[in-house]
Amino acid sequence: MLLDALRNEPTIIPHLCADCTENGIGVGIDPTIVADKLLIIKVDDYYHANVHPQPKSPDCLIVQQCEENTYSIYIAELRDIDSPDGFSIKEIVEKFETCLGNFMSERFGILFHDTNYQYRSIKLLFVTDPYGYKRQPEKQNKDRGLKLDNLLSVRIPKYFGKHLYIEPMLPNPTIKSCS
C-alpha cells in the first residue's frame, strides 16, 4: 500500500505531519476521513532539509486512500498575502512541477509510479486570498482577479496520465471523503 510505503521511507518520515497549515492558511481535512487513510507530507520542509540548493516547492502533499489501491492526491501551496503582488505565476507553476516531476516522479517515483496504484484525482491547490474575498464576499462576483484567472489557464505538463490545472481556492478549503 502506498501510504505504508511512504510512512516507512526514512527521508520522508521526519516530514510527515498532522495538518497542512502555514501562517493561518491551510487545507482542512473532513473529520469523517479515517486517519490511517490519509498522509500529509511537508514537501517544502523535505527540500529544506535534504536538497541544496533548494528548488521552489509547495507546502504540502496530501495522499488520501480511496479504495484498496486507488488514491486522491492534493498538492497545496499556501499563501497569506494581501495583494496579487505576493505571488508570481511562474513561481507557483514551478513549485507544483517540482513536486510532480522531482519529488513524486524522480526521488520517490518507485513508490508513486507503481503500476498497482491508480489515481482517482490529482488536485493542485493554490490556497490564498489576495483580493480579500473572504472578508468581502460580495467583491468576488464584481472583481475577478486577472492574475488568478491567468493562473487557472496555465496547463501543467501531463503527469500520471492526467492533464492538471492549478485551482486557486480561498482559505481554508476542506478535503472531503473520496465517496
Image (cartoon, helix red, strand yellow):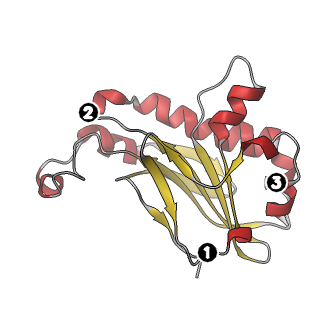
Q: Residues within 10 Å of mark 3 (few under 14, many from 20)?
A: some
Looking at the image, the residue that sits furthest to the bottom is 179
Pick the residue in front: 96 or 174: 174
Disc marking residue 33: 1
Q: Are marks 1 and 2 in contact (CB under 8 Å)?
A: no
- Looking at marks 1 and 2 on the same chain, the residue that comes earlier in the sequence is marked by 1
Q: Residues within 10 Å of mark 2 (few under 14, many from 20)?
A: few
Whole-angstrom CA distance, mark 3 to mark 1, is: 18 Å
| Residue 52 located left or right of residue 162 | right
- Looking at marks 3 and 1 on the same chain, the residue that comes earlier in the sequence is marked by 3
The quarter of the picture where the N terminus appears is bottom right
Residue 42 occupies quadrant: top right
Dot 2 falls on a residue whose secondary structure is loop
- Residue 178, position as x, y percentages in the image: 59, 76
| Residue 100 located left or right of residue 105 | left
Disc marking residue 6: 3
- Discs 3/1, front: 1
Disc marking residue 83: 2
- Residue 110, position as x, y percentages in the image: 87, 49
| Residue at point 40%, 56% (across, down) | 172
The quarter of the picture where the C terminus appears is bottom right
Residue 29 shows up from this direction: yes
**Above/below status of 84 relative to 126:** above
Whole-angstrom CA distance, mark 1 to mark 2, is: 34 Å
Residue 64 occupies quadrant: bottom right
- Looking at marks 2 and 3 on the same chain, the residue that comes earlier in the sequence is marked by 3
Tag 1: amino acid: Ile
Dot 3 falls on a residue whose secondary structure is helix
Tag 2: amino acid: Ser
Residue 113 shows up from this direction: no
